[in-house]
Image (spheres, grey):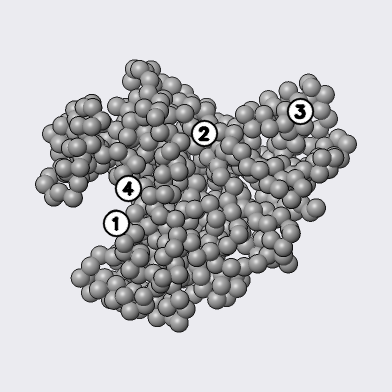
Amino acid sequence: MALGHRRLSIIDLGGGQQPIYNEDGSLVITFNGEIYNYQPLRDELIAAGHAFTTKSDTEVLLHGYEQWGVDLLQRVRGMFTFVIWDKNRRELFGARDHFGIKPFYYAKMNGTFMYASEIKSLLQHPDFVKELNAEALKPYMTFQYPAIGETFFKGVYKLPEGHYFVYRDGEMSIHRYYDENFRESDQKLGELVNTIDDTVCGSVKAHQIADVEVGSFLSSGVDSSYVAAVARPEHTYSIGFGKGTYNESQQAGELAELLKLNNTAEALTDEEAFAAFPRIQWHLDEPDSNPSCVPLYFLSALAAKDVKVVLSGEGADELFAGYIDYGVHTKYKPVKMLTRWLTHMPAGVRHAIARFCKGKTFPGAWHLYANLAPAEESFIGQARVFEEAQSERLLKPEYRKAPSVQSIVDKTYARVKGKGLSELKKKQYLDMHQWMPGDILLKADKMTMAHSLELRVPLLDKELMSVAEQVPTKYLINDENTKFAFRQAAGRHLPKEWYDREKLGFPVPIKKWLREEKFYKYVRSVFERDYVGLFFDQAALLKMIDDNYAGKTDDRRKIWTVYSFLTWYDVYFVHDGTKPEVIAID
């Protein structure tokens, strides 16, 4: 039995080295993350007779497990993965936080059970067998991120969010300890806004507990702006590409000036972004074609020059319904009003109208369909790059055999079947278990930890979730905007220009890149490599990038998704997983 740990010191800088043992040495722990309520739990455990040798939150988990067993997981507030070895019982216990903020991978190969927070750590083990998981590619092409439980490395799995495991006598059992309880309530708007703001303020304060300085990311959007306005950190950080559409740092700087924050901003060049892309895919462990991975990588490098910890705004879009893909597909208020009225019709009527609207091109047809159709039929999450039929045509036969997109999302939808949820709340629930842990949180953790920077997400907190899960659907999205109630709460701290701004995401100029000769030629050269034909119809792939470059099509997301996979494959299989150098784009 061996436990290993590499520490980024945040709490109890001098005394929190791991592994940590309990009083008699029968239990030993390694831990990745932060427990924000560790201080009151520590006091409770001391009162119960436990002796502490450090002031760290790690030791609170250890004694907490000793005192409460698995019920510890109902008491902690934070982001975490940890394992505890019980010498007496010869048993390994491990858990992942409620939402999957921190990653946890495991494998059993050649009789050895191994686990890590990064897959690249497992590759070094002498019993590890590296093999591409052929079933992972096809779903990835639709979702843009690894969408199944088994990773792109065959035999390596992810422990799901909100789960714990027990490994004993060569057998692993996995159990759920947490799930969201979305439901309706009759809360009044004013009362709800007060509760949201009070809980956000409390969460931000809890997430600032540290023995080092805590900074904050700052964009032009409401989420990071709300967090920064409440936290008032010494330093905030912003980034963008060049000037204009793809650079939010100017607006972020304006807010920082208004709030009297010290904001550091940086503008990326296109060449810098492309040069670092293989290294970005190396840090991700698995391919992810979310374009925002690129600016997030550089933003993290910028912040890491000054601080070890930053706050960020992830989570609000899922908890309070901030995405336009939840059903905002028109700007015309009459269409919105009609749709809202129709949502109160019986399910059979709603679904019949949705079926009529599907595929139609009249104004408002897509908006009507997206809001009236069953979520199970109309929504797979925040990304749909390739349709499955398109993937089938492009992939070689051996990579077409994979779980279908529908079967992947059906597993999650099945857990809320019969609970009477609105279609919007069903979409939120799906995103909490697919998009959030599979893409948003994964890239956030990997891109920040690439620079030894810890990212904390106060808007993705179990106390705030207990508020969000019962927000009336009418206060999530209405005729005014997405995440309506949340924006009203943010308005207690931000000017209307910021709290009411439409969601933009992290703008990345992929369309521009793929129609600029030097970047087009470089990506095309990747598509021309010999190994590409192992996976794809290479002629069709080259035609796709040529037609896009010529302006005949707009397939930028498809091209970027394939390019991301091929870059990752080159790093981990052609070059055996060694950290790539920064490349030069001529």
Label for residue 67? 3
Q: Name the residue located 81 percent from the left edge and 28 percent from the top edge.
A: 50
* Badge 3 amino acid: Gln
* Badge 1 amino acid: Gly
Q: Nearer the viewer, residue 333 or 348?
A: 348
Q: Name the residue located 39 percent from the left edge and 30 percent from the top edge.
A: 418
Q: Name the residue located 45 percent from the left edge and 26 percent from the top edge.
A: 467
Mark 4 vs mark 1: in front: 4
Could you tell whether 147 is left or right of 254 in the image?
right
Mark 2 vs mark 4: in front: 2
Q: Which residue is mark 4?
A: 504
Mark 3 or 1, nearer chain start: 3
Mark 2 vs mark 3: in front: 2
Q: Which residue is mark 1?
A: 244
What secondary structure is found at the residue carrying circle 4? loop
Q: Position of residue 115 (x, y in %)?
A: 67, 53
Q: Nearer the viewer, residue 256 or 357?
A: 357
Q: Position of residue 12 (x, y in %)?
A: 73, 40
Q: CA distance from mark 2 to mark 1?
A: 41 Å
Badge 2: residue crowd in 10 Å (few <14, some 14–19, many ≥20): some
